[in-house]
Amino acid sequence: MRLFRQLFWVLLTLGVLLGIVLIFSYDIIKIDWVSFMEIQPSYRPMEDPLPPPARSIPIEGAISIPGMGAPTNPTVPDEASLKRGAELYAINCQMCHGITGEGNGPVAPFLVNFKPANLTSEVVQSKSDGSIFLTLTNGVDGRMPALNENLTVSERWDVVNFIRTLRSGE
């Protein structure tokens, strides 16, 4: 009986010592478990969006089918549309393009490679509504993110209508 008791205490002591060694050596060994999130595949927002599946119909309708050309503006630029467009512009565009749309928003000085477009300029204002809509929808590669996931089709048309008011400083 005494031998079993001694053997128990020796094994318990060795187990505790082994446990302590393993705890302190864990940071050195670095065992990667499959459940660790940092080793799982992940994507940053707006990084490599997947193209729509072949022969699929977008839920937003034909307006978002690539290669269809610039669509026509179905939204009448009435007071309600301009108000919604101003609110959406303030949320999604103003940080880069500024309150007046001149490309002088609070984020603009930090954009070193490409400055935001001056939305009041003749270059932008001479574009068709559909062209501005497609720019909002698809973004500008490396310069402006696509807003098709942030804004619905009708909201993007409201922003287009609001951008048209920036020409005259309304």
Image (cartoon, rainbow, N blue to C red):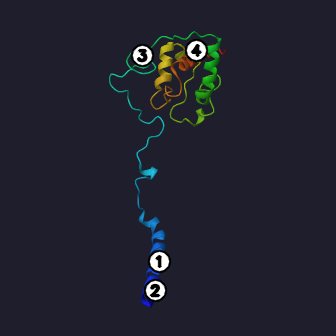
* Mark earlier in primary sequence (2, 4): 2
User: Which residue does the numbered mark 2 point to in the structure image?
Assistant: 5
Q: Residues within 10 Å of mark 4 (few under 14, many from 20)?
A: many
Residue 120 appears left or right of 54:
right
CA gap between label 1 and label 3 equals 69 Å
Please name the amino acid that badge 2 sits on.
Arg
- Quadrant for the N terminus, please: bottom left
Judge the density around disc 1: few (<14), some (14-19), many (≥20) Cα neighbours within 10 Å.
few
Query: Could you tell me which residue is drawn at 63 percent across and 26 percent down?
Result: 90
- The reply, left or right, for residue 62 in relation to residue 122 is left
Q: Residue at (40%, 53%) from the top-left corner?
A: 34
CA gap, disc 4 to disc 3?
20 Å
* Label 4 sits on residue: 161
Judged from the image, the secondary structure of the residue bearing numbered disc 3 is helix
Rendering quarter of residue 119 = top right
Q: Nearer the viewer, mark 2 or mark 3?
A: 2
Where residue 141 sits, quadrant-wise, is top left
Which of the marked residues, 1 or 3, is nearer the chain's N terminus?
Answer: 1
User: Which residue is tagged 1?
Assistant: 17
- Which residue is depicted at the point 52% across and 17% down? 123
Mark toward the start of the polypeptide (4 vs 3):
3
Front of the two marks 4 and 3: 3
- The amino acid beneath tag 3 is Ala
Q: Secondary structure at mark 4?
A: helix
Tell me the distance, in whole angstroms, between the alpha carbons under discs 2 and 4: 87 Å
Could you say whether the residue bearing mark 2 is in a helix, strand or loop? helix
> In x, y percent, where is residue 46?
47, 34
Which of the two discs, 1 and 4, labels the residue nearer the N terminus? 1
The reply to whether dot 2 and dot 3 touch (C-beta < 8 Å) is no
Which circle, 2 or 4, is nearer the viewer?
Answer: 2
Distance in Å between CA atoms under marks 1 and 4: 73 Å
